[in-house]
Structure formats: C-alpha cells, structure tokens
Amino acid sequence: MMDSSAVRAVGVHGQLAEIWGDVVSRPQLGKAMIIGAVASIAIYFLALQTIAPLASTPAVGKAIAMLAGILGSVASGAVCARLFAPKRMVVEQAQTGTVWQTEILEQLEQEGGPIGRVEDLPPPVAQEMREVGLYDLFKSYEERRNSGRQGE
C-alpha cells in the first residue's frame, strides 16, 4: 500500500517508491511478491499432498499444510532479503546542544517532574551517556536549570 507522500525516483535498481516508511525498488518488490506467492502456494500444495494424508483427520492435515505454506512464505522472505538488498541510505550526524533537545528536556521535566542530576547516575550509565553524546547535554541543561533557580 503506497501512501500519498510516495517518493518516485529512478535509482540503480529501477523506479523507487516509499512504502510503509521504507524505500523500495518497484521492480524488485514485484519480483519478491511473485517469489513469495509461488513459494508459499507450492509448499502448501506439496504439504497437502505429502504430509496431510498422514494426519489423524483431514482438518488437521489441512492445518499442517497451511502452516507449511506460512513457513514457505517466511522462507521466501529470507530468500528475497538476500536477493534484494535494502535501498535506504542511513546517514548519521551527531548534533549536540541543539534547541530541540533542550525543548524536549524541558517538556520531560514539565510532564514527569525533575529529571535528576547526572552525578547521581551509576558509572556504567554515565559512561554510556558519554559514548552517545547525551551526558554533556544533560549536564549543561542541569547547570542552566540550577543557575536559573539561583537567580530567582
């Protein structure tokens, strides 16, 4: 299902489209759908012919065949994931001390109460915050908050 903000661009792999928030190649999506349908139906009928007669009742045999068809669909998904690599490009940019981060911290404090002090954090948590670039943000927010209260 394609939403109204579909991205239509031509890339190395043909026409690209945005579907459910992800960028896909339309030709490869069509091929993946065909592979999935053929694999799941073929495995369903194969199981219906080979495994279903061994079941205690015909209903159980049909249920087992349907389960095999679902497993065939999952297997075809794995095959298509190998055949068709993702088209998205992830670009990571660290932006520290931006206005929106401070606004989020202010909103968190308004909605949930005091955030607390970074000095009170356990060392592993503080180290992890340093690694992802959040420790300095929280520390500077805390200092601004404390200096504002002292001026009151």
Image (cartoon, helix red, strand yellow):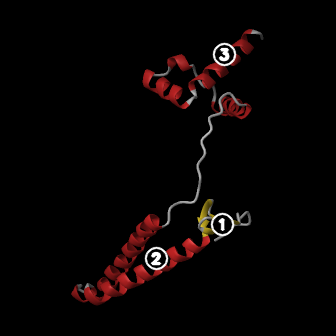
For mark 2, what is the residue? 36
Q: How many marks?
A: 3
Q: Quadrant of the N terminus?
A: bottom right
Q: Is residue 52 above or below residue 112?
A: below
Task: Report crowding for label 3: few under 14, some 14 to 19, many 20 or more residues within 10 A (C-alpha).
Answer: few
Mark 2 and mark 1 residues within 8 Å of each other at the beta carbon: no
Q: Position of residue 115 (x, y in %)?
A: 60, 25
Q: Nearer the viewer, mark 3 or mark 1?
A: 1
Q: Residue at x 57, y 60 (%)?
A: 87
- Residue receiving disc 1: 17
Q: Is residue 95 left or right of residue 82?
A: right
Q: Is residue 17 above or below residue 145?
A: below
How packed mark 2 is, by other alpha carbons closer than 10 Å (few <14, some 14-19, many 20 or more), is many
Residue 95: give x, y in percent of width and height: 66, 33
Q: Measure how far apart labels 3 and 2 are at the Cα level.
A: 56 Å
Give the image quarter of residue 24: bottom right
Secondary structure type for disc 3: helix
Q: Secondary structure at mark 2?
A: helix
Q: Earlier in the sequence, mark 3 or mark 1?
A: 1
**Which residue, given by chain and number where applicable, does mark 3 sit on?**
143
